[in-house]
Image (cartoon, helix red, strand yellow):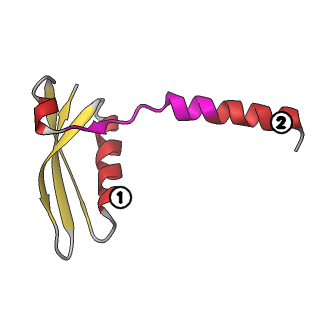
Amino acid sequence: MTIKTAINALGLLTLVTFGACAAEQVSQQQAQNLQSTGIITVSGAGGSPMDQQARLAEKADAQGAHAYRIIEARSGNSWHVTAELYK
């Protein structure tokens, strides 16, 4: 790989990284200053809490939300998380 190709690849990677705008998790106190836009749920079997948060953020992004707050979480053989979305 030439240096020019490596620089171009790095530039494209930077654009993709900074172009992504993922919804972030907020606390109840932070949410008081935001406008609610709806509720989402995700559920599944297995996976870590980080996987669950990633799925929440992905679903919030798809709905056009900038932030979300978890309002319910259950686990056992499977898990279920409900979150409120905010602008």
Amino acid type for the residue under numbered disc 1: Asp
Membership of 17 in magenta stretch:
yes
| Label tally | 2
Q: Is residue 19 left or right of residue 52?
A: right
Q: Secondary structure at mark 1?
A: helix
Q: Which residue is at the front of the view, 33 or 22?
A: 33
What label sits on residue 9 in the rendered view?
none
Which of 32 and 40 lies nearest the eye of the viewer? Answer: 32
The residue that disc 2 covers is 5
Give the residue displayed 14% in from the left and 34% down from the top: 38
Tell me what residue is drawn at x 32 percent, y 36 percent: 23
Rendering coords of residue 65 (x, y %): 27, 31
Q: Residue at horizontal 69%, vertical 30%? A: 11
N-terminal of the two: label 2 or label 1?
A: 2
> Quadrant location of the N terminus?
top right
- Magenta part of the protein: which range? 14-26
Label placed on residue 51: 1
Callout 1: few (<14), some (14-19), or many (20+) C-alpha neighbours within 10 Å? few
Under mark 2, the amino acid is: Thr
Tell me the SS state at disc 2. Answer: helix
